[in-house]
Image (cartoon, rainbow, N blue to C red):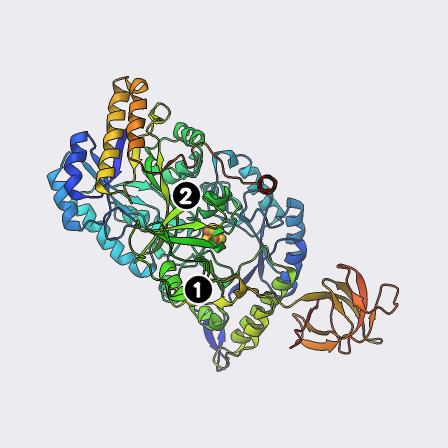
Amino acid sequence: MRKVSQIINGKRQIIKKPELLAPAGNLEKLKVAIMYGADAVFVGGKEFSLRSQASNFSLEDIQEGVAFAKEYGAHIHVTCNIILHQDNLKGIQEYLKQLDEIGVTAIIVADPYIMFLAKSMNLNLEVHVSTQLSTLNSQAISFYQDMGMDRVVLGREVTYDDLKAIMNQVDVDIEYFIHGAMCIHYSGRCMLSNYLSRRDANRGGCSQSCRWYYDLYQDRELVNQEDDMPFSMSSKDMSLVHHIGELIELGVDSFKIEGRMKSVHYIATVVSAYRKLIDSYCEDPDAFKQNDYYEKELQKAANRAFCHGFFYDHPTQDEQLFNLRDEHPTQEFVMRIMDYDEKTHLAQIEQRNYFKVGDQIEVFSPHHENLVFKVEKLLNEDKERIEVANHPMELLYVEIPEKVLPNDMGRKVKQS
Amino acid sequence: MKLILSLNKKERLYDYVSMGIDTFVLGGHYSFYAPYNFSLEEMSQMIEQYPQCSFYVAMNALYDEHEIKDVQYYIDKLVKIGIKGLLFQDFGVLQIVKKNSYSLDMMYAPETLNTNAMTLKVLKQQGVTSAQLARVIPLEEQLQILQQTDMPLMLQVHGVEYIAASKRALLTNYQQASHLQFDLTSQTRLTIQARNSEDIFHIYEDQRGTHIFSQERLYMLDLLNQIHDFEYLYIETLMMDENEAVEVASLYSDALKSFQNNTYDRDVKSYMNLLYQLKTPLHRGFLFDQTVYKLEDVRKMDHEKSQSNH
Ligand code: SF4
């Protein structure tokens, strides 16, 4: 049993806070994730990383990311989690050496050859076993431990009860997914995309073919006629927002948020919600009361309904999406605050999506409570009045009655 | 080069042995998938009855923590009845075997992951003694791996191909959501076809979850000249009826003999004609094809596809 809490001054306090690990598809997202409270960020390099469609990082980007993270006491993990084919074998050692020199904290690896190389090169960086290996039991974890691995990212199929049993038996770092999209098949073992689109899922090219619509036949007779629900294998997104306390009490070392291809708004919203939730629980675990605030926050950046994944055991039909209409647009991210003048109440903003005078905007921040204001005064860069903001990345001025801070974000409040 | 076959019916074992096949993969209680799941008793009887044969057991699932102790007991029983080895994909299985110093041939068969030689070299140091190559790489790469690896390798030469598996009951969930009626447990009755694709896949459900396989059978009957250096040529009899399995095994067994007698080049055409007469859907899988890796390749392919649609 891992020691997670102890009585300090008569009150039980959490002494082992989990790492909050966030995804980032580019430098802006990396910085936002850290500013909004991530302890560590995982990014994909241009080589040897899955998510070939996510805007992957060059070595220079990673270097800048590491330097930025250091300022905040945060860490950078780099995914090197492709399954190597014969023509991917060259250049790995050199790449690992460069990552180590840059000061990356860990690499996330799926191929045992990269595990072996990283360990035999005596690098400073940690080697984490990727979820692509679908590790579900303590014996498999012990195998990786014997190979010198520093952490194992568990498969998403691990239930709470199994996780509890694992945590009681192993003494290597354990990382567990708490939020994000899920593969519906065993990770690393799904070749749907390979067969249907010639895109290699194990080398980052997955075309998400599980989410397509399929006709179902029995003995060659069509089962789902035109008006019937199409067959699909699409999972709702996982969110363990209501179970964070239980996971902290188990001593899980790292809580992972999925989504390297997600927007900066998603990263900020999700990281911020979990940061506040974890901190609030750890501050006084016995007085902590679950409330809807965090889930409501998370929903503002979600385009799919949430589910618990395998937390309680087998996901049912309620954990799947059978209709595209079950996907909905997220609340619109419209501005990032660059500066605020307390005398004039004018905030300089970077416009991200269309908004206009009269819209209600909610500003959220890692540093203060959310606040809502109505756009009354909108100025262009030359401080002339305008009615609409419709040029992304344009610098504008908006009057905001309450004080906001640089890097706060604004999203349009849906009008009912 | 020898044939190895997943056994679909105990009663046909005699036929296979008469053809000269002496290595079999048996399905059992912990198999991920198998044409038939034999009890320990049945396995034991076969081992006693055919001492000249080698029997592997498919322990090829990914095991949850709550079942890993039972997996351990089961492996212990398998060792006691005298099986030759295990086909596995969960390193937990390998760890159990290593910790107990069982002397088993540990054939690493993770369906999708054995795609290069260096990884297999590393795994050899970790206790893997043989391996099945992934099917999603071209033959050329499979041959390269063969040249660069010093452990016995198995290549699937015939049968349906594994596509994906989920721990979820995807068909039950769909049935409940759609209220449609269908037989979700038969291995062969249901197929799915993506609405923008020609490919047809088998799909079925069991207590381990949902399994998807190709409908077409991979075949290499005419490729023995290229693949003869592989230690094991595997025939997957899943989803075959017993006659198809015996016919296919017999064709490959004859082809192997003919190869050894240097008459294969002359006979191969007639073997292929006999194979076509079985009228089962055949394909080459990825043997002469490639998947794409780099983003640029994906874009190029999507572009070509959209051009060809216009
Ligand atoms: S097709 Fe779906 S389940 Fe398969 S790898 Fe892609 S996202 Fe995962």
Q: Amino acid at mark 2?
A: Thr
Q: Nearer the viewer, residue B27 or A127?
A: B27
Q: What residue is at 40 percent from the left and 34 percent from the top?
A: B284
Task: Give residue A144's position: percent from left, percent from top.
Answer: 40, 49
**Crowd rating for badge 1 (residues with CA inside 10 Å; few <14, some 14–19, many 20+):** many
Callout 1: chain: A
**Residue A252, picture quadrant:** bottom left
**Crowd rating for badge 2 (residues with CA inside 10 Å; few <14, some 14–19, many 20+):** many
The count of marks equals 2
- Of the 4 image quadrants, the one containing the C terminus of chain B is top right
Q: Nearer the viewer, residue B4 or A72?
A: B4
Q: Which residue is mark 2?
A: B112
Task: Give residue A315's position: percent from left, percent from top.
Answer: 40, 64
Q: What residue is at 31 percent from the left and 27 percent from the top?
A: B273
Element marked by disc 2? loop
Element marked by disc 1? loop
Q: What residue is at 57 percent from the left and 77 percent from the top?
A: A293
Are labels 2 and 1 assigned to the same chain? no
Task: Give residue A298's position: percent from left, percent from top.
Answer: 57, 69
Q: Which residue is mark 1?
A: A309
The yes-or-no answer for disc 2 within 8 Å of ligand 1 is: no
- Quote the CA–CA distance across marks 2 and 1: 24 Å
Callout 2: chain: B
Q: Amino acid at mark 1?
A: Gly
